[in-house]
Image (tube, rainbow, N blue to C red):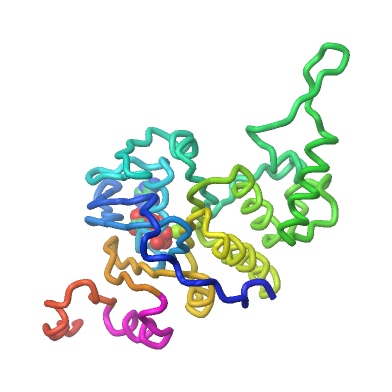
Amino acid sequence: MLHNTISPPLSNDAPVVLEMSHVSKSFGAVTALVDVSVKLRKGEVLALVGDNGAGKSTLIKVLSGYHKPDAGTITSKGRPVRFQSPRDARAEGIETVYQDLALIGDLSIYHNMFIGREYHKRVLGMRMLDNDRMRGMAEEYLSTLGINIPNVNSTVDRLSGGQRQCVAVARSIYSSPSVLILDEPLAALGVRESAHVLGLVQKLRREREVSIILIVHNYSQIFEVCDRINFLHSGEIVLDAATSDITEEELTRTVKSGLGRLLRPEERAVPMAATP
Ligand SMILES: Nc1ncnc2c1ncn2[C@@H]1O[C@H](COP(=O)(O)OP(=O)(O)O)[C@@H](O)[C@H]1O
Ligand SMILES: [Mg+2]
């Protein structure tokens, strides 16, 4: 299967394409992110992990222009950027597939693939959607990615959760972004469908053109397709490690035993406070 093929390690001189420095974000009294710094290099696949409510979605929503940070900066391809909206982030080459996918249920699969970038044709001088062209391109593109959708004419709400995820991912990759962000792309998927999405990620990883941030819970999947792991706990990054420098067992142990702190060696000597 695709995702079992080994990718060569990321080159040490791969440039940083996207960087978040000292970002904080609160929603009223709820602190979602505290002084978070993340670096993403060209072609890198970065796993973002952490419990529910840890701030993972908020982090990527800041990167994708959906939320503005309260403090801190974002740098894209070496330049500081201030996204006013997801449109700004997209113009910078950052594509995001959110947890809720944002597909339009009662629209056909191929129309969903081309939302916002429809092809048109002229018929008797009138501008009309070029449905044949979009249908053909959607079929071809999905099959190139190994995504098995019987009929691109059917509406999205007739698809399984897994098929929807694949369509959403395919749609985002279609515009050749420099950064692809996937919020829990495997959450609703069965084993075979997960393998498809992971195969897609592995394919992109081998090509090392697009950089990917992936929120995923299953550690063995992380070690299979990711170069690096950032672990978020209560809005803070408490572990940042290359998958080649840590084993799955070490990660599990670190997470269970009180949340990383690998970033702060001075804290390692301090015994953890007993929880009352
Ligand atoms: N739009 C929002 N308004 C208020 N609170 C929010 C909002 N989005 C997230 N939060 C809160 O911020 C914290 C982090 O949430 P989130 O980033 O969704 O975590 P995760 O994706 O890791 O589960 C949670 O306490 C959540 O309830
Ligand atoms: Mg989330």
Nearer to the camera, 195 or 106: 195
* Picture mark count: 0
Q: Residue furthest right?
A: 124
Please, is residue 257 above or below residue 22 in the view? below
Question: In the image shown, does 133 or 52 lie closer to the viewer?
Answer: 133
| Quarter of the rendered image showing ligand 1 | bottom left
Left or right: where 235 falls relative to 265: right
In reply to whether residue 249 is colored magenta, the answer given is yes
Q: Residue furthest top?
A: 125
Q: Splitting the image into 4 quarters, where does residue 227 fall?
A: bottom left
Residue 98: x %, y % from top left: 52, 51
Q: Which residues are magenta?
A: 243-258
Front residue of 169/11: it is: 11
- At 51% from the left and 52% from the top, the residue drawn is 180
Query: Which quarter of the figure is the C terminus placed in?
Result: bottom left
Q: Quadrant of residue 67?
A: top left
Report x, y in % for residue 260.
Answer: 28, 77
Residue 102 drawn at (x, y percent): 59, 45
| Residue that appears at 78% across and 60% down | 148
User: Residue 263 lies in magenta, yes or no?
Assistant: no
Quarter of the rendering occupied by the N terminus: bottom right
Judge left or right: residue 180 versus residue 1.
left
Q: Residue at x 27, y 57 (%)?
A: 37
Q: Residue at x 50, y 57 (%)?
A: 183
Q: Is residue 224 above or below residue 130?
A: below
